[in-house]
Amino acid sequence: MNSLAARTESMNRRSGTLPDGRRWDALERGFHCQLNGGILIAIDYIPGGESARIKGPVDGIADAELDQWFDWLFALNPALQRIVVSAPGRIRTTAVKEISRVDFYSRPELWYRGNNGGNFPLQWVESESGLRHPLRLAPLRGEIYRRHFYSLGMDLSLRHLDPEQDLELFTQWMNQRRVARFWEEAGDIAKQRRYIDQVLQDPHKSPLIASFDDVPFGYFEIYWAMEDRIAPHCDAQPYDRGFHLLVGNKRFLGNRFTRAWLNGVSHFLFLDDNRTQTLVGEPRADNIAMLKYLNETFGWQKITEFDFPHKRAALVQCERDIFFRAMGGV
């Protein structure tokens, strides 16, 4: 089932629950939704509309009580751009609060578990090759991002690769024929350990393991573009980011999973530093499947093609403002 069909099916059901068990029931034009303690709120929303309104006893309710309902409603309705919250007895046009899709998904505390968030001060340093770039904060070990994807009914999580825990699985993935075709890094476990050690020692890269419901499915090697080989081809700015990837668990191949992890990894990179305005990538120009996904997803687009010594590459980019207006909806 594709993401659009999954969203449609979910919103056409007459009832359901959030991951924490709180219940919703469909109304003629909207939903009854449950807060903790059994309190009910009503959501007025016509599918396809840009605005929704939450009505109920919300005065004094903590923001966390409503956050999951915001996420659920935004995620399953890509046209929705703002949610207005009002309380009983107030004039309908008077809002207690209003939140936009952009502002909601820009809040790092809901999904982000890292140690940066744009708080690491700008300090210019010079590499051995003479390149001036910002000093990069060493990434936090362990889990750094987690978000529920309603169309899948699954959590996507990202954590720092641990060689002691992940090397055997990483080696299996690198030696799959379809992975080796694009990565050109097939080899035994000793070779893969040398590869990972090089990544871990490089301050402009971080190796991540991605999981759905804590089942590892892929490897994402994120990097700062200014210090990367892509820099001359994309006019890299100080906080531009990019990533290389592989999906090693074949259970998680296909459009609905690709849309989720592409959304989630992009979201993480923008949350990891609020100064990041552009994400970039350089997949092989003949990787037709990946380019198709990118061109259809959340602000990513192919810009041009160029040559590396080892491949013909496609330059792809995603701009922060476009991404946050379009994200969710999965």
Image (cartoon, rainbow, N blue to C red):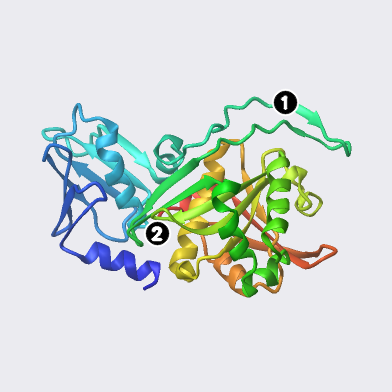
Against 175, is 153 above or below? above
Q: Using the image as rendered, state which of residue 139 and residue 225 is in the foreground.
A: 139
Mark 2, Cα crowd under 10 Å, few <14 / some 14-19 / many 20+, is many
Q: Dot 2 corresponds to which residue?
A: 330
Residue name at image x 15 percent, y 39 percent: 56
Q: Using the image as rendered, state which of residue 67 and residue 323 is in the foreground.
A: 67
- Image quarter in which the N terminus is found: bottom left
Determine if residue 153 is in view: yes
| Residue type, mark 1 in image | Gln
On residue 62, the disc is none
Specify whether 231 is left or right of 161. Answer: right
Examine the image and state in which quarter residue 282 appears: bottom right
Report x, y in % for residue 131: 84, 37
Determine if residue 224 is in view: no
| Residue type, mark 2 in image | Val
On residue 123, the disc is 1
Against 194, is 274 above or below? above
Specify whether 110 is left or right of 269. Answer: left
